[in-house]
Amino acid sequence: MIAFGKEAAATAKAFRIAPTDSNYFAVLFDPEKDNIRNVFVVEIFTPGGATPPNTHAQADEFFYVLSGEGIARCGAAETPLRKGDALLLHPGNEHIVQNTGTAKLYCLTVMTPNEGFAELIRNGQPVELDAEDLAVLGG
């Protein structure tokens, strides 16, 4: 068994779940590639973009804002998101994350357990990371 995995975010495979989605994902670690029970991605939101309203039956979803700003809504509650903020969403709560800034919003997103999220991402449309993405992901 391999003791650790390593992935450079700038060379990770990226996908958009649906052609009309305003967010896309650079896959860092997932069940298919790494034989794990969760998924780690950098989620990238275009200005004004958002996740569709969604709920997870058993998974906790974690967001850590790497760059940009946005807002998270869960039921009637909402909270602003800025670089350095961490957000944890518990199972069973419908939520969205939206980019409210003028630049892209970048979040490290972790779903535990995976609950089919990685498969949904990988079955989407491949996306090429642009120069802005590579600059943020490359540190």
Image: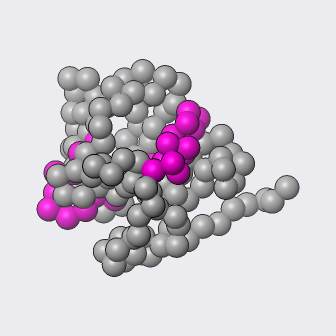
The colour scheme used to paint the residues is one colour
Residue in view at x 17 percent, y 52 percent? 48
Q: 50 above or below 69? A: above
Which residue is pictured at 52% across the width and 73% down the height? 11
Image x and y of residue 113, in percent: 59, 35
Instruction: Residue at 61% x, 50% y: name it.
Output: 30
Q: Quadrant of the N terminus?
A: bottom right
Residue 83, x across and y down, in percent: 30, 58
- In the image, 116 versus 134, the foreground residue is 116
Give, as a single range, the part of the protein colored magenta. Answer: 97-124
Q: Up-down: is 13 above or below 125?
A: below
* Picture mark count: 0
Residue 133, quarter of the rendered image: bottom left
Pick the quarter of the image with the C terminus.
bottom left
The answer to which image quadrant residue 116 occupies is top right
- Residue 85 in sight here: no
In the rendered view, does 55 fall on the left or right side of 115?
left
